[in-house]
Image (cartoon, rainbow, N blue to C red):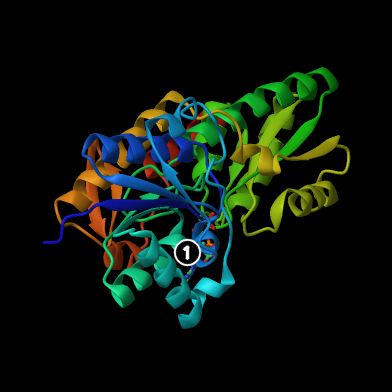
Amino acid sequence: MKKITNIGVFTSGGDAPGMNAAIRAVVRTAIYENIQVTGIYRGYQGMIEADFVDMNRRSVSSIIQKGGTVLKSARCLEFKTKEGRQQAYNNIKTHGIDALVAIGGDGTFTGADLFSKEFDIPVMCIPGTIDNDLYGSDYTLGYDTANNTVIEAIDKIRDTASSHSRVFFVEVMGRDSGCIALNAGVGGGAEAILMPEVDSGITELFGELELAESRNKSSMIVIIAEGDQNGGAYNVAKIVKDKFDHLDIKVSILGHLQRGGSPSSFDRVLATRMGFKAVKELMAGNSRATVGLRGTAIVTTPLEEALSRKEFKLDEELLAIANIMNK
Ligand code: ATP
């Protein structure tokens, strides 16, 4: 096994709170182990353009509490071409980088897997996305923080909803996954939750609205994941308005504010554990894998497995509980 001397770390795809804490953990663990660290700016784009910075312990001071990513992120089409990846490899070789830690979502993992196979370079991935839609980890970095952000927004919206007897449709992130909608919906006490995975959502919503009316309930919060099968909050609002014309309906799209903000305690600790594990696994000769949290343990899953499998992350028990809380 070749000894690793210089780890290149980068963030790629959509940013997520906790990415900085992961970068910090990678840098500090590697330096503790006498391994150099090179920061690669803007993910694969920075690799192709040789946008590198040598990092030391101090380079990651005071970033654990910051949202976003100090190494910046980018989507890079050129890396999908053989020529692009060859250029990236030439640059990292020239710089002496002999292993990589990639922090991002499934696109980032796909690129890392391909690159590692083509050029025989060890790589470990860290799942960073607020959507919690990756196989191999119960939780991805940023998901907990995003839930807290959404709950805070729901609390504020409820103040105005109840003052004016309104029904609010709040759209949260999640193109394919209802994880944020379900968790933040339960945590925020939403009266109904619509998710991409549940196709009976709109019928159930009609039932909830009728029930609320029969109880003279004057305000309601309905959480809708952006990927819901009815086409998002504006569409749902239109469908409901057609049936319940007398309701005062408002729509609030939370959008990108869900991706920002200081990471929660949970995300900071998870990121630190994952960054540490990624370096240790590379040192032990593990490669082409993602680190992840399973139960309370940090484990690794081969990228080939993580990329080929999908896991249903929506907690069925929580789903059932949510339905009871609304009744
Ligand atoms: P998010 O979950 O936030 O979308 P992501 O990591 O999935 O994050 P992508 O934009 O899909 O975000 O992927 C990040 C980058 O990974 C791409 O811009 C591209 O450079 C690289 N990448 C994605 N798919 C491939 C692929 N098939 N081959 C090579 N590189 C890829």
Q: Quadrant of the C terminus?
A: top right
Which residue occupies 52% across, 46% down? 71
Work out which residue is located at the far front of the displayed protein and give it.
94
Camera-side residue of 135 and 283: 283
At label 1, the amino acid type is: Gly
The answer to whether residue 313 shows anywhere in this view is no
Q: In x, y percent, where is residue 131?
A: 51, 48
**Taking 162 as reference, is 294 left or right?**
left
| Residue 295, picture quadrant | top left
Work out which residue is located at the far left of the displayed protein and give it.
1
Which residue occupies 58% across, 62% down? 75
Camera-side residue of 53 and 147: 53
Query: Does the Cβ of the disc 1 residue fall within 8 Å of ligand 1?
Result: yes
Disc 1 marks which residue?
107
Q: In x, y percent, where is residue 44?
A: 50, 63
| Residue 67, picture quadrant | top right
Q: In x, y percent, where is residue 21?
A: 43, 34
Work out which residue is located at the far bottom of the displayed protein and give it.
82
Camera-side residue of 200 and 88: 88
Q: Secondary structure at mark 1?
A: helix
The answer to whether residue 14 shows anywhere in this view is yes
**Taking 117 as reference, is 266 left or right?**
right
